[in-house]
Amino acid sequence: VVFLLDLSASMETGFSHWTMRQMAARICACLALSAVRNHDKVGFIGFSSNLEKYVPARKGTRHALSIVRDCLALPASETKTDLRCVLDFASGVLRRHATLFLISDFWNDGWQKAISICSRRHDLVAVRLQPPELAGLPAGLFHVRDPETGLKRVLDGRDAATRSAYQKHAADWQSRVEADLRKAKVDLMDVPVPKLRDPNAIARPIYKFFRMRVQRGAKR
């Protein structure tokens, strides 16, 4: 089991109880400790626009917990996310078949070919973090800044047309990501990041995903 974690600055933002990075760390902790109980090795690749850290897969609880620490402690990069770079790296360095969890918000492009190649060699799972602001723009005036480019702008959530355009853009992009993943035959685990504290926020999407896999296998 290898975790491919997006360390870009966008993972540190949002209007939720936890940042997307904190949510990702909890997902990794749950899956990593489960892998340890199954006597599997656990590895880690942190990335932004470049490779930030690579930890080869090993067994043991202490090793798994060190990976969880990296998920939380590694500094965020202010560069753009490049999924292609980590997928190319994983395809090249991981010679044996592995289960890969690619954890990101997937608000980037240019990874489609690389994910298709990687998924042919490994069991690749796309873990898409979904902050609550994707559900719609609240009514109000917002001064926003893109954490990866530094671009600043004002969004007028009081305007119905602005809210509608915002929601349409978010929905269209998510639909496009889903279509690209289906084309590459990559399974998707959607992980909503709760606006308020939710004790089941981690277990719910993991259970739903693996239940889907079990049911799909039973139909074959």
Image (spheres, helix red, strand yellow):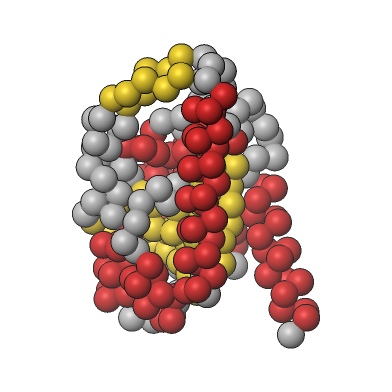
Which residue is located at x 56 percent, y 67 percent?
187
Q: Position of residue 105 (x, y in %)?
A: 45, 47
Locate residue 204 relative to residue 194 in the image: left or right: right
Q: Residue 191 appears at what percent x and percent y?
A: 58, 47
Above-or-below relation of 161 to 62:
above
**Residue 13 visible:** yes
Q: Residue at coordinates 74% horizontally, 85% vertically from top-left?
A: 220
Question: Where is residue 45, by image quadrant?
Answer: bottom left
The image quadrant that residue 12 belongs to is: top left
Q: Position of residue 193 (x, y in %)?
A: 57, 37
Q: Residue at x 67, y 47 (%)?
A: 203
72 to the left or right of 135 = left
Residue 56 location (% of width, % of height): 32, 65
Q: Nearer the viewer, residue 34 or 139?
A: 139
79 relative position to 204: left or right: left
Viewed as shown, does residue 117 lie left or right of 103?
left
Query: Is the residue 12 above or below the residue 183 in the image?
Result: above
Most extreme residue toward the bottom is: 220
Please report the residue visible at 55 percent of the width from the left and 46 percent of the height from the top: 171
Q: Is residue 166 above or below residue 100?
A: above
Q: Give above or below for 21 relative to 121.
A: above
Can residue 104 be seen in the rendering of this structure?
Answer: no
